[in-house]
Amino acid sequence: MIGKAKRNLSTATGFFLLAVVLLWLKTYVIQQTQFELGTEKAIQKFLLFLNPLGSSLLFLSFALFLSGRKKYAGILFIDLVLSVLLYANVVYYRFFSDFITFPTMFQTQNFGDLGTSVLSLMYPSDILFFSDFILLAAVFASRYKKLDASRIARRKVAALLIFALGVISFNIGLAEADRPQLLTRGFDRHYIVKYLGMYNYVLYDAVQSTRSTAEKALADSSDVTEVLNFTRSHYAKPNPEYFGVAKGMNVIYFHLESIQQFLINYRLNGEEVTPFLNSLIRDKNTIYFDNFYHQTAQGKTADAEFMIENSLFGLPQGAAFTTKGLNTYHAAPAILSQLGGYTTAVFHGNNGTFWNRDEIYKSFGYEKFFDADYYQMDPENTAEYGLMDKPFFAQSIPYLESLPEPFYVKFITVSNHYPYLIDEKDATIPPHHTGDKSVDRYFQTARYADEALKEFFDYLKESGLYDRSVIIMYGDHYGISENHKEAMEKVLGKEIDALENAKLQRVPLIIRIPGVKGGVNHTYGGQIDLLPTLLHLLGIDSKDYIHFGTDLLSKDHDQVVPFRNGDFVSPTISYIHGKFYDTQTGLELPEDRMDEAKEYLKLVEKKLSLSDKVVNGDLLRFYTPKNFKPVDRSKYDYNRHEETVNH
């Protein structure tokens, strides 16, 4: 029996079948244990087991077209490629709770800054993810001279390919039966991986990426009509109480890296983690939104910026910052420059090429971009993602003072970034004690970021800018992903179910307007809503612009907050991972409320779909709002010149 098995391993068929079985079972185990796919029904569990089989058969079969011993080497090579792809998604998922897409693969300009973050997500035990390849390589090496080098008839290989496609078709049929329109409403990649498997997801993603790339070439001016009709019909007129209350004031945005809502007023061992932010929300002129959600996807920080500048959603795959940098936009910097005479600038202590900022900012109409070239990047003051917040703000002051008022500026902080590393000398609060290192350190870097803000606000008050500026602070995305659920349950002292995890996507939104009465505002909203809100505060009506958000202070504001994967939250109904919930009770929605819930879902899907059409088709090139001129990118040069303010 053993001798026969050894002889079979010396044949291409035996070697191939061993590779298929090992890759199939390995992939199944990894999909089951490394990803949160929510397989509840028996058919979903069966499909998770089945789906690696069809793709393993399909991809490995191509090696059988090779001649001689190249067949074996081909099987090894394909197995290695698929293993690397699978492992890369495991590492990516450990932080982002998402899967790699083709656009993210080509964001190579970001890779140089990701070293420590990636290494912190890799474990020595990960070598087991390549156990099948190691075993196959050992068999190949030990039996090399005995391997059968005869050619396999092409009709047999073709029959094998047809069988593999049959398995995949059967898989798709069952998936569509359980999840209708799976491939046409695929906002959430978790569903694609759950029903079709990792390797088939890659094929699906490739098709989607190709299709979105082709949209621009096929688009014409008629495509913008549907979008305009939708945004105009969902326009929220300004609240007279707030319209124009900040007209002519400076606008200062603070992009708070990884700051989540739960940090506000949170005490660790009796001590406030963010004492300055806590004090700011109590300021009599501060409006604090406590039901404000980040709506980012794979672009994370870049998605947040994209939404606040344009009131357009980020893309479902990759980041518009990197793939759509040359598009036409009607962004906040251009609007305020043209209609309000604002000077516009971004401050960021990192490389200008990161997230393609040095290109897309030109399309937004930013006049100045102070990147790492403008700062003293001493090793003791820099972290993995750029200049630490305290020296960053301190060094930004001369540049800020060089700008004519009124100005529209944005400060992008980096210190509170995964994996939340901080020198002992900079840590002024002990770590948490959940046992999860990144979660525990998160509170220390958040405290450091809070202290840096206080120091800069002291300058703003001393200089008088505090009393003549609208100050807007927003969290850009989550800091702690759902992969750290056990630790977060210790932090919050309660169980985190699907709806509670959705609520954890809340980030602070703090708007301080001199002379305007503040307070806590419980309105539901997201980053998509910031631009129309700001424009109305400055006395600029947003009705002529294509915006998918609405003014948070308007009585007509839409409180259904879409997430990029098609889920949503609202004050009454939420939709998470395919289930509807009563937002207030946390219970699944009764049948008599499903009609209302499904209308919300249709609205969310329509918004996401139309926004994608605008971005992928570059539709804003076909429409110019009244009193607005298209941005001329050639006017902007962000390179440092001699006349720049020196320290």
Image (cartoon, rainbow, N blue to C red):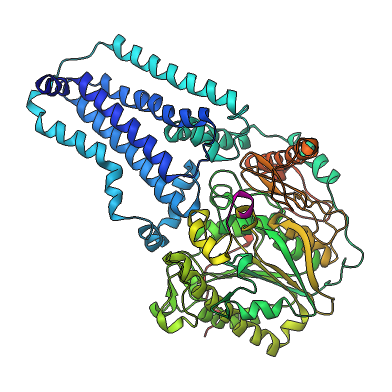
Residue 248, picture quadrant: bottom right
Instruction: From the viewer's side, name the closer residue of 62 and 88.
Output: 88
Instruction: From the viewer's side, name the closer residue of 188 and 324.
Output: 188
Residue 291 percent across, percent down from the top left: 72, 61
Q: Is residue 288 left or right of residue 421?
A: right
Relative to 284, does residue 533 appear above or below in the rendering?
above
Q: Residue at x 48, y 74 (%)?
A: 387
The range drawn in magenta is: 495-500
In the orientation shown, which residue stands out farthest toward the left? 145
Instruction: From the viewer's side, name the closer residue of 2 and 300.
Output: 2
Do we see residue 141 in this rendering?
yes
Whether the magenta-drawn stretch holds residue 565 is answered as no
Q: Is residue 46 left or right of residue 342?
A: left
Relative to 304, does residue 186 appear above or below in the rendering?
above
Residue 217, picture quadrant: top right
Residue 133 percent across, percent down from the top left: 24, 37
Q: Residue at x 23, y 14 (%)?
A: 152
In the orientation shown, which residue stands out farthest toward the bottom? 462
Residue 598 percent across, percent down from the top left: 75, 36
Residue 154 percent across, percent down from the top left: 28, 12
Do we see residue 631 in this rendering?
no
Q: Residue at x 58, y 65 (%)?
A: 492
Q: Is residue 322 left or right of residue 224?
A: left
Relative to 587, does residue 400 appear above or below in the rendering?
below
In the orientation shown, which residue stands out farthest toward the right? 240
Q: Quadrant of the N terminus?
A: top left
Number of numbered callouts drawn? 0
